[in-house]
Image (tube, grey):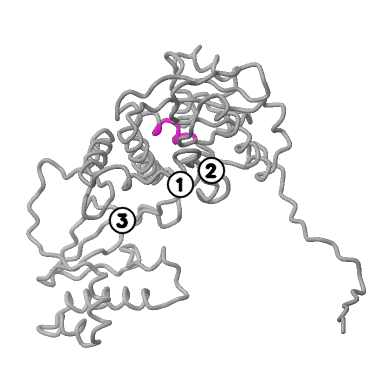
Amino acid sequence: MVLTCTLDHDYIPHVVEQPVLNKWSWFIPGMGFASDYCMSQKISAVSTSKDALKVSRLKCGRVQCPNCYEWWISERVFETSVKIMAYSRAFKKLPLAISVSEHPDTVTEYTWQDYQKSFRRMYRRMKKRGIDGGYRVFHPYRVKDSIKKELVSIGVINGSGGYWKAIRNNALNLGSWYDYIKLAPHLHVIGFSDWVEECTDTDIVIKNYSTLDTVSDVVGHIRYLLTHCGILGDDDSSKPTMPWGIMHKFNMNEHLEPLEILDIKNQVAEAMGLVYDQYKDKIVMPAPEEKKEDPYTWLPLYSFRVYSAETEANTNAFLAWNISPVHEFINNVINEYLDKIEDPSIPNSEKHVFLEDLPDPPEGLTLVYTDEVE
């Protein structure tokens, strides 16, 4: 027996139409707005002597935030530079700085799906021209020629660089940074090749700029590219940096010894003016040369969550003896933090005890302000 199914309407495949992207569809790092809570002061720790609270600042970490974008860039500079230098050491090849773009007249009606197809066309063309792969950084814009001339004429620019710094500073006092730029999507590639055949007379233009000879060259070039890469939407889900070709499947652990990888990470961090923390496997700010002696021993607020999970009595036991206005104040801070942590209706960005929301501290309680940013 054959079962049949009759539809009482014609089947129409569901097709999601993507919007055509224009120059206002993207933003560049740091050229948006900070979150409401960014740089707010929060209570981060309690002294074991039970008479002091540590106050630090909270960052939102958003790429569009003027306060946070530089660290967002630094994290990606480190990650990308380490992989580039690892490949360079493993295969004894120097990376190249390359640009590739389609003719600007062809991208005026592109959706994001069209851009992805364009990237694949450019990858194929680069391979035909001798480029085996690397990391690409997407730039949706170029500075208008008229703007370049005006910036040079007022003495803001010396040479060919520095336009984007002038744009960040709104050197011409224009209404928006978008007034400085035009839509001209292109890729910058930190790539590897034994030879590169430049191409300037076809639909896709490929230019080989220079060889990146040192770790500092690689770090500086990637940092500069990321200062004005294109971010689509509210975050970096559009992947402004992406490996392709030979770098897509490259695993440094299969080609280098652990000590070689550690050496590369240390060199990259040093070139960035930072320190690589081997135990946290991330870059950190260098310790100040003259660190002030801290008279307090601190318990981070988050540690009370662990105590509370083990037994409800631990938090109260911490402040059980010699109850005073100071201890009561600290107890309220701890309990407010624990209540926020356990409340699923509170966004993670608000699961902190903000200094501005607290009453005036009682006499005898010390607030220790730090430069720490979390």
Q: How many marks?
A: 3
Amino acid on which disc 1 is placed: Val
Element carrying mark 1: loop
- Above or below, comparing residue 291 to residue 16 in the picture: above
Which residue is at the front of the view, 81 or 361?
Answer: 81
Q: Is residue 176 above or below residue 356?
A: above
**Is residue 348 on the magenta stretch?**
no
Where does the image place residue 313, in percent across and percent down from the top left?
21, 88
Dominant secondary-structure state across the stretch colored magenta: helix
Counting residues from the start of the chain, the first of labels 3 and 2 encountered is: 2
**Image position, residue 329 (x, y; %):** 22, 75
Label 2 amino acid?
Ile
Which stretch appears magenta? 222-228
- SS label for mark 3: loop
Q: Confirm or deny contact between disc 1 and disc 3 (CB under 8 A).
A: no
Which residue is identified by label 2? Answer: 231
**Residue 102 spot, x, y in % from top left:** 64, 28
Nearer to us: label 3 or label 2: 2
Q: What residue sits right under mark 3 in the picture? A: 374
Q: Residues within 10 Å of mark 2 (few under 14, many from 20)?
A: many
The quarter of the picture where residue 181 lies is top right
Tell which circle, 1 or 2, labels the residue nearer the N-terminal end: 1
Labels 1 and 2 touching (C-beta < 8 A):
yes
Amino acid on which disc 3 is placed: Glu
Residue at the spot x=31%, y=42% of the render?
A: 255
Q: Residues within 10 Å of mark 3 (few under 14, many from 20)?
A: few
Q: Nearer the viewer, residue 126 or 206?
A: 126
Marker disc for residue 63: 1
Residue at (12% x, 70% y) in the render: 48
The residue under the point 41% across, 66% down is: 350
Give the residue drawn at x 23%, y 87%: 311
Q: Cα distance, mark 1 to mark 3?
A: 15 Å
